[in-house]
Image (cartoon, rainbow, N blue to C red):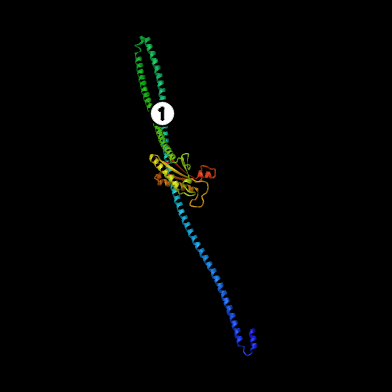
Amino acid sequence: MALARLGGARRPDSYTWPGFVDALATLLMVIIFVVLVFVLIQVNLAYRVSGQDATLNTMREQIASLGEMLNVERNQNADLSAELDRITSQLLIAEESRDDLSAQLVTVMATLQQREDALASAADALQDRNSEIARLNAEQAATTSDLAATREELEARLAALLAAQAELQQNAGRITDLEAETAASRAEVVQMANAMTALRQRLESLQALLANKEAQAARDKIAIASLGKSLNNALANRVQELQRFRSEFFGRLSEVLEGREDVQIVGDRFVFQSEVLFAQGQAAIGPEGQTQLAELAVVLNQIAADIPADIDWVLQVEGHTDDIPVRAGRFTDNWDLSTERALSVVRFLAERGLDANRLAAAGYGEFQPLDPSGNETARRRNRRIEIKLTQRISGSE
C-alpha cells in the first residue's frame, strides 16, 4: 500500500492498478487463512476418527472376552448340574442300602426272638417235667412211709401171732377151745397178706412209673443237650470254615502282595495306600492301581470258587482319608471322597468277575485314623483303602 501510495504520488493521473493489487493481496490472504483453517479442521477430524477407531477396537475385544467368559460359565453350570445329578443318585443308592440293612436287622431280630422263645418254651417244659418228677418223688416218699408203717404193723401182728402160736404150744390142751380163734386169726393173717401183696403191687407200679418219668426226663435232658450241642457244633463248624477260608484268603493275598511296601496287613485286613490307587483328591483308579487290583481280583476269584455256597461271606472295602478338608470341587467332604473311592474299588472287582452280592463298600472319611499324630507321615498312613473278608449277618436261616 505504501508502494501504491508512492506510485500514486508519482503518477497522480491513474489509481486503478494499486487498488486492484490491494484487492488481490487481501483476497490471497483470505484464501490462505481459509485453507489453513480447513487443514487444521481436517487434522483435528483425522485425530478424532483414529481415536474413535481405537476405542471401537477396545470395545470389540471386551465384547469377545465377555463372550468367552459367558461360555466358560455355561460349561461350569453344566458340570455342576451333572455333579448334582450324580450326588442325588448316590444319595438314593445310600438310602436304598440303609433300607436294606434295616430290613435285614429286623429279620435278624425276629429270628433271634423266635429262637429265644423256643429256648424259653423248652426251659418251661423242662421245669414242668422237673415239677412232675418232684411230685412223683413226693408220692413215692409218702408211699414208702405208708409201706414202712404197714410193715411195722404186720411185724407187730406177726409177733402177736408168734406169741399166740407159742401160747398154743404151751397150752396144747386148749387147742380145741381155741380153734375158732385160730381160724379167725388165720383169716386175718390172709387178709393182711393180701393187703401186703396189694401194697407191694402198688409200690412196684409207682416205682415203674417213677422209673419211666426219670428215663423220660433223662431222655429230654439228653435231647436238649444234644440239640444245643448240635447248634453249637454247626455254628462252630461255620465259624471254623469261614476262619479257614479267611486264613487261606490272608495267605494267598500275602503271597501275591509280598515285598510291597505300599500294602500292609493290619489286624484282619489288607491296607492299600491311596497314593498307589488314586491321584490326590480323585476317586478314579490309576493305571498302577488297576494293575495291583487286577492281580488281587484273580486271587479273590480263585478263593471265592472254593468257599461253599452256604457260607454267607462278604468282601468289605473301606475307604479312609486324612483330616485335611476337601477343597471346592466334585466331592462334598472326606466322607464323600472315601465312599466314592471304596465304590471305585468295588466296581473294579465286580468288573473282574467277583459276585456283586459278595462285595460291600463303606466310607469312613478321616474319623478312623491309623495314626492320630497329625503330621504328614501320619496323614499319608491314614489315606488308605482297607479290604477284609468277613461274615454277613443274614435273616434267611
Give the number of marks: 1
Residue 158 visible? The answer is yes
Quarter of the C terminus within the rendering:
top left
Quarter of the N terminus within the rendering:
bottom right
Residue 103 visible? The answer is no
Residue at 41%, 28% in the rendered image:
133
Residue 207 lies, in percent from the top left, at: 38, 25
Residue 129 lies, in percent from the top left, at: 40, 31
Which is nearer the eye, 353 or 162? 353
From the viewer's perspective, is 376 left or right of 98? right
Q: Which residue is mark 1?
A: 133
Which element is circle 1 on?
Answer: helix
Report which quarter residue 142 is drawn in: top left
Which is nearer the eye, 195 or 81? 81
Which is nearer the eye, 345 or 397? 345
- Decide: few, some or many residues near mark 1? Use Cα within 10 Å; few <14, some 14-19, many ≥20: some
The image shows residue 243, relative to residue 211, as above or below, that is: below
Residue 261 lies, in percent from the top left, at: 48, 42
Which is nearer the eye, 208 or 341? 341
Report which quarter residue 21 is drawn in: bottom right
Q: Amino acid at mark 1?
A: Ile
Residue 307 lies, in percent from the top left, at: 39, 39
Q: Residue furthest front?
A: 10
